[in-house]
Amino acid sequence: MEKKNIDWANIGFGYMPTDYRFVANYKDGAWDEGALTTDANITISECAGVLQYAQTCFEGMKAYTTEDGHIVVFRPDLNASRMADSCRRLEMPVFPEDKFVEAIEEVVKANEAFVPPFGSGATLYIRPYMFGSDAVIGVKPANEYQFRVFTTPVGPYFKEGAKPITIRVSDYDRAAPHGTGHIKAGLNYAMSLYPIMEAHRQGFDENMYLDAATRTKVEETGGANFIFITKDGKVVTPKSNSILPSITRRSLMYVAKEYLGLEVEEREVYFDEVKDFAECGLCGTAAVISPVGKIYDHGNEICFPSGMEEMGPVIKKLYDTLTGIQMGHIEAPEGWIKVIK
């Protein structure tokens, strides 16, 4: 299929409508078969559950063109499983995990002309989401739901290369100890908007959230998980029941151990020990890893030895290895790459 006439090298990280999206509806206790549609608009009741009580969750992943010309998606089964967990926590009907993966495949195939070519640095971002669609005025779960998947081509997250960022320790709490921090609920992101804009207004790129109970342990940023590298080369990531289980982070930890032969550890990370790490990164779908050069803590600065000019050596190896797997340069573990075409 001929590609769309898009300046692939210069598109940003924003929304560009594509030709098709997938829609399925839940009514009377069951999901319909779902279908592709060209209509990008949604019509719902003014009293819809999503509008009144924020009953919605979402996922995010990418389709890539590999060096040998295949279109692939990275570990969509894990996105399906995580969305199922989100739905259960929000009292929403689970969209069957096998049907989830099939919907992703169907949408990507239908929008093949929007999948950026290999070497452009761009990818096709895929956004599955679900919401309560019928009228709900009492505080209770909706009775009807809609599951949708749309796609949009996006440019490389780092146009000028992955320069280390500066983050601050936030005074706000991201998630309660027994709250919804472990699921990808829209409400989690709504409450993070003010803190992130406040951080930007103060000249910082991101927030570091500490645990709400004791404010002594590192959690995440709200949009990404942390990865730290010790001075002896160990890869450490925070463990907490209120951290979203990042698919990128889980993949990086596997890569660190099985591909690079590094020691890995998922454990509670106390903020007091952050100053002793050699490298720090934020990992997620959009950027894979964003290197952190400096953390600002209420007048005190933590500067990592890796510096503010480029990724630290271990994080660079992790980044290169995982992106190599995604792009087809490096053989992937079984089941990680879903070939669409």
Image (tube, helix red, strand yellow):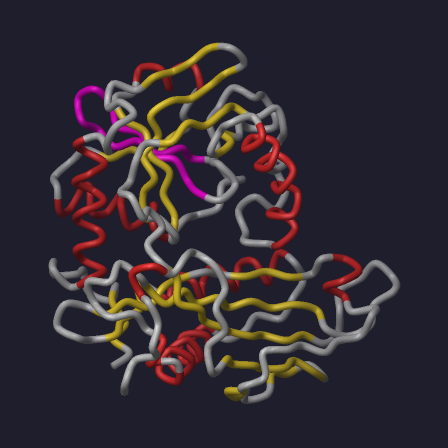
- Rendering coords of residue 320 (x, y %): 18, 47
Total tally of numbered discs in the picture: 0
Query: Is 25 on the left-hand or right-hand side of 239?
Result: right
Which residue is most to the top?
300
The residue that appears at 38% across and 22% down in the rendered structure is 294
Q: Residue, x 46% and y 10% (percent of image)?
A: 300
Indicate whether 326 appears above or below 168. below
As drawn, is 340 to the left or to the right of 45? left
Q: In the image, 165: left or right of 89?
A: left
Tell me where residue 109 appears, x and y as whole percent: 35, 83
* Quadrant holding the C terminus: bottom left
Residue 57, picture quadrant: bottom right
Q: Position of residue 335 (x, y in %)?
A: 24, 67
Give the position of the N terminus as an image quadrant.
bottom left
Percent of width and height locating residue 328:
15, 64
109 in the magenta segment: no
In the rendered view, tell whether residue 146 sits above or below residue 335: below
* Residue range highlighted in magenta: 224-239
Query: Which of 162 and 227 lies nearest the eye of the viewer?
Result: 162
Look at 48% across and 68% down and name the residue there: 16
